[in-house]
Image (cartoon, rainbow, N blue to C red):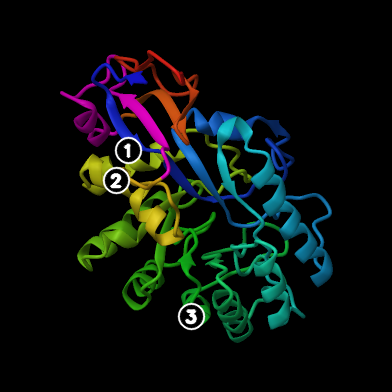
């Protein structure tokens, strides 16, 4: 039992775009405990967009299938600090056939890594593989924008539309964004998820947000960090995106929080991200940061300020108390009794 002491309860935040490797370590930045640090930013669930930073990542079909299945297993069996990491997301490589997707799906793989980070670079081939993946219940994300890591390349609006992946990954670029007219084209001509990331172009993020609003389709907007990456690890990346989109994108703070919770949960078919009976008990207790302007937490976030995280709860169990990364909250929740 938790006495919230009047603070705000939200669903656990979801990072729709991360690149984990193994355990709570990333060789991309030689950093330990980045997942635990992200938990202190209110994130309770992460979605892999490909384990592409694994040293010596196999690119042959047998090897990539083996690594995808292994990655799914090790994060299923080991949850750093309780974090839910949905991993095992192979990138598409030339030579894959339908049976490969069937085999991976039967073994528990439910995600594809970013289309375009492997050797498959043309829309026709990518679309066929995405359709095979979808047939067996595997969700897909496509890289959008300029080159990010060695081996990747430009993925423009034409290829995104032809491929028809389930999520338009980092529509605001990762790192380099597409020209404005192509971003607008994707928003207008594709019904898939519009993922905006921290490690992208901020101006392009606002363009995508404004276009989605004009279309009356804000439910398509989901948030990710796209870390670990060259920009580093962003433990507060999702909170920063919520505050940025609310303050600069003229979105009510409560709506911006939905981009990182319910929108992503519905897009990703998760049992978390919503405060409903039957959903996983994944929560964040937060309050207005000490000395931050605004009459309450929502106004403070609307002014561009981060809230203070006081506690995270995953599957009904408190996982962290006062955040070591956010500014201190005005008030703190308190565990007043436990099981029995």
Q: Nearer the viewer, mark 1 or mark 3?
A: 1
What whole-number distance in Å separates the C-alpha atoms at marks 2 and 1?
Answer: 8 Å
Question: Does residue 313 lie above or below 205 as drawn?
Answer: above
Q: Is residue 285 left or right of residue 16?
A: left
Residue 265 part of the magenta-drawn span: no
Of residues 16 and 313, the one drawn nearer to the viewer in this rendering = 313
Instruction: Give the quarter of the image for residue 137.
Output: bottom right
In the picture, the disc for residue 184 is: none
Point out the image quarter for the N terminus: top left
Q: Which residue bears the numbered disc 3?
A: 158
Q: Position of residue 297 (x, y in %)?
A: 24, 28
Q: Measure how far apart labels 2 and 3 are at the Cα level.
A: 29 Å
Q: Residue at x 30, y 57 (%)?
A: 209
The location of residue 64, given as percent across then percent down, is 77, 64
Please give the residue where the numbered disc 1 appears in the rendered image.
Answer: 243
Residue drawn at point x = 50 percent, y = 46 percent: 225
Hey, which residue is sitting farthest bottom in the picture? 124
Crowd class of label 1 (few under 14; some 14 to 19; many from 20; radius 10 Å): many
Q: Is residue 204 visible?
A: no
Query: Nearer the N terminus, badge 2 or badge 3?
Result: 3
Lower sequence index among marks 1 and 3: 3
The answer to the question of whether label 2 and label 3 lie on touching residues, with beta carbons closer than 8 A, is no
Query: Does the magenta portion include 302?
Result: yes
Secondary structure at numbered mark 1? helix
Point out the frontmost of discs 2 and 1.
Answer: 2
Q: Distance between the Cα atoms at labels 1 and 3?
A: 32 Å
Q: Which residue is mark 2?
A: 256
Give the image quarter of residue 326: top left
Position above or below: 92 against 302: below
């Amino acid at each position: 039992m938790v006495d919230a002491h009047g603070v705000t309860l939200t669903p656990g935040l979801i990072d729709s775009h991360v690149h984990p490797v193994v355990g709570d370590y990333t060789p991309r930045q030689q950093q330990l405990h980045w997942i635990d640090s992200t938990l202190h930013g209110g994130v309770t669930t992460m979605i892999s967009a490909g384990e592409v930073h694994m040293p010596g990542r196999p690119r042959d079909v047998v090897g990539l299938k083996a690594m995808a299945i292994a990655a799914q297993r090790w994060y299923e069996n080991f949850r750093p600090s309780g974090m839910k990491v949905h991993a095992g997301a192979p990138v598409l490589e030339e030579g894959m056939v339908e049976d490969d997707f069937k085999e991976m799906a039967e073994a528990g793989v439910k995600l594809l890594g970013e289309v375009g980070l492997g050797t498959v670079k043309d829309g026709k081939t990518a679309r066929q593989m995405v359709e095979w993946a979808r047939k067996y219940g595997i969700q897909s994300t496509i890289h959008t924008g300029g080159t990010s890591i060695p081996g990747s390349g430009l993925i423009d609006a034409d290829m995104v539309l032809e491929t028809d992946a389930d999520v338009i990954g980092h529509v605001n670029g990762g790192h380099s964004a597409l020209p404005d007219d192509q971003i607008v084209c994707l928003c207008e001509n594709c019904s898939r998820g519009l993922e905006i990331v921290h490690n992208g172009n901020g101006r392009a993020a606002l363009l995508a947000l404004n276009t989605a609003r004009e279309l009356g389709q804000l439910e398509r907007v989901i948030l990710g960090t796209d870390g670990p990456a060259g920009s580093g690890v962003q433990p507060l990346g999702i909170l920063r995106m919520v505050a940025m989109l609310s303050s600069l994108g003229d979105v009510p703070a409560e709506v911006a929080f939905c981009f990182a919770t319910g929108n992503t949960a519905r897009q990703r078919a998760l049992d978390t991200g919503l405060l409903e009976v039957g959903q996983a008990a994944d929560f964040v207790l937060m309050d207005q940061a000490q000395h931050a302007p605004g009459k309450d937490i929502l106004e403070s976030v609307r002014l561009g300020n981060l809230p203070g995280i006081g506690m995270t709860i995953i599957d009904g169990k408190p996982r962290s108390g006062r955040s070591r990364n956010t500014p201190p909250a005005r008030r703190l929740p308190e565990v007043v009794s436990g099981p029995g």
